[in-house]
Amino acid sequence: MAELTPKTIFEEKFPEKLKENPQLAKDVGAVIVFEVSGPTGGTWTADLTKSEGWITSGAGVTPKMTVSVSDEDLTKIAAKQLNPQMAAMSGKLKFKPFDMALAMKLGKLF
């Protein structure tokens, strides 16, 4: 597998996981914008209301929630080196507006 970066997480890992289990997208059923800070960061939109083509680069639509995280913390979460709940409680992972139910559903993508 390619080096784990925000780009590979959003453009390879998430789409693969969603293709393997399309029910994950249905379970979340919302538009989420990820704002990733840091040198390898960027902005990605996950439209989990669609049946395919879920992840796009940039933020072109109004999301139900925006998730903010650093590139370093995102890669640690994706590599299972950082628990997403602990990251949220320590302020490394921020949700706006905060929707606990939606945040918990998002955890399944990781």
Image (tube, grey):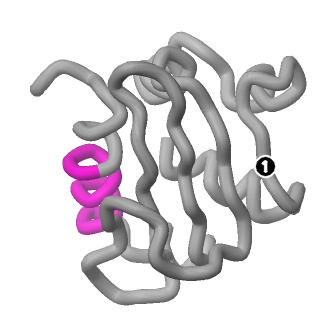
Q: Quadrant of residue 19?
A: bottom left
Check if residue 39 falls in the magenta segment: no
Between residue 55 and residue 79, name the one nearer to us. Answer: 55
Check the image and report above or below for 110 versus 74: below
Q: Quadrant of the N terminus?
A: top left
Residue at 81 percent across and 56 percent down: it is: 96
Q: Nearer the viewer, residue 70 or 101?
A: 70
Check disc 1 and report the residue beneath it: 95
9 vs 24, left or right, is left
Q: Position of residue 36 (x, y in %)?
A: 51, 37
Name, please, the residue furthest toward the left. 1
Along the horizontal axis of the image, is 89 left or right of 26?
right
Percent across and percent down for residue 74 are 51, 27
Percent across and percent down for residue 100 are 88, 56
Task: From the top left corner, tell me how far across and down residue 93 is, in percent.
Answer: 72, 32
* Bounds of the magenta segment: 11-20
- In the depicted structure, whether residue 5 falls above or below residue 26: above
Task: Determine crowd level at label 1: few under 14, some 14-19, many 20+ residues with C-alpha closer than 10 A.
Answer: some
